[in-house]
Amino acid sequence: MNGVSLPDDKSLLLVDDDKPFVTRLARAMETRGFDVRMAESVAEGVAMVRQAAPAFAMVDLRLGDGNGLDVIEALHATRPEARVVVLTGYGNIATAVTAVKLGAIDYLAKPADADAVYGALVGDSDSRTVLPDNPMSADRVRWEHIQRVYELCNRNVSETARRLNMHRRTLQRILAKRAPK
């Protein structure tokens, strides 16, 4: 593996509300030499960052009390060189772009195993990803574009509909549906 030189500080913060998953991941990361702390909410994650900002973090996007992007923002305000991986079951391009802009080095979809998380945390961030065998469908590309504009409009349905030149109720129906394959 093309690895980067790791700092002496191997502190890792795992922020996820899926207790069994995060417990298994914590054990796996401890066997790989990390000093692991766990948080189950945005508030708990931000508090741990303010207490002692870790060198590494894995943050779930959707948490019970808010958005994991708030934890990433707090971490990079405190420790800009921290390596953060975003993990989510609700992936879309808009949130991936936002996460990277806030300082995340990678974006993984659930379910991800410990090897994938470890590889993302310590891997070479300059390496190119392989093109997928099955690219997104036209419906999925449209849905991703709508999600991106929706995020850019701070999740304001009326403003998003205006910018997309779409009726507000039509947009609400699209947003209520699951993402196409």
Image (tube, helix red, strand yellow):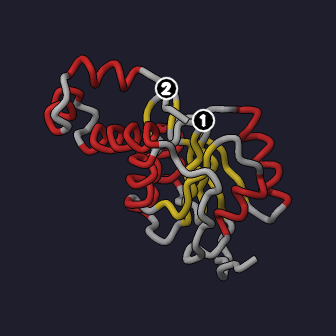
| 10 Å crowding of disc 1: few (<14), some (14-19), many (20+) | some
Q: Residue furthest right?
A: 31
- Residue 62 placement (x, y as % from top left): 51, 35
Q: Which mark is residue 40?
A: 1
- Mark 2, other Cα within 10 Å: few <14 / some 14–19 / many ≥20: few
- Quadrant location of the N terminus in the rendered image: bottom right
Q: Nearer the viewer, residue 6 or 4?
A: 4
Q: Is residue 151 above or below residue 34?
A: above
Q: Residue at x 53, y 64 (%)?
A: 105
- Name the mark on residue 26: none
Compare residues 49 and 99 and report the one nearer the observer.
99
Q: Is residue 67 left or right of residue 24?
A: left
Mark 1 or mark 2: name the one nearer the start of the chain.
1
- Give the spatial CA distance, label 1 vs label 2: 25 Å
Mark 1 lies on a secondary structure that is: loop
Q: In this rendering, is residue 17 above or below 10?
A: above
Indicate the position of residue 20 as horizontal and vertical percent values: 76, 33
> Along the horizontal axis of the image, is 178 left or right of 155?
right
**Kind of residue indicated by mark 2:** Arg
Q: Is residue 89 visible?
A: yes
Image side of residue 28 versus residue 155, left or right: right
Q: Residue at x 80, y 42 (%)?
A: 24
| Mark 1 or 2: the one toward you | 2
Quadrant containing the C terminus is top right
| Residue 73 appears in view | no
**Total numbered circles:** 2
**Camera-side residue: 134 or 145?**
134
Checking the image for residue 178, the label placed there is 2
Q: Are marks 1 and 2 in contact (CB under 8 Å)?
A: no
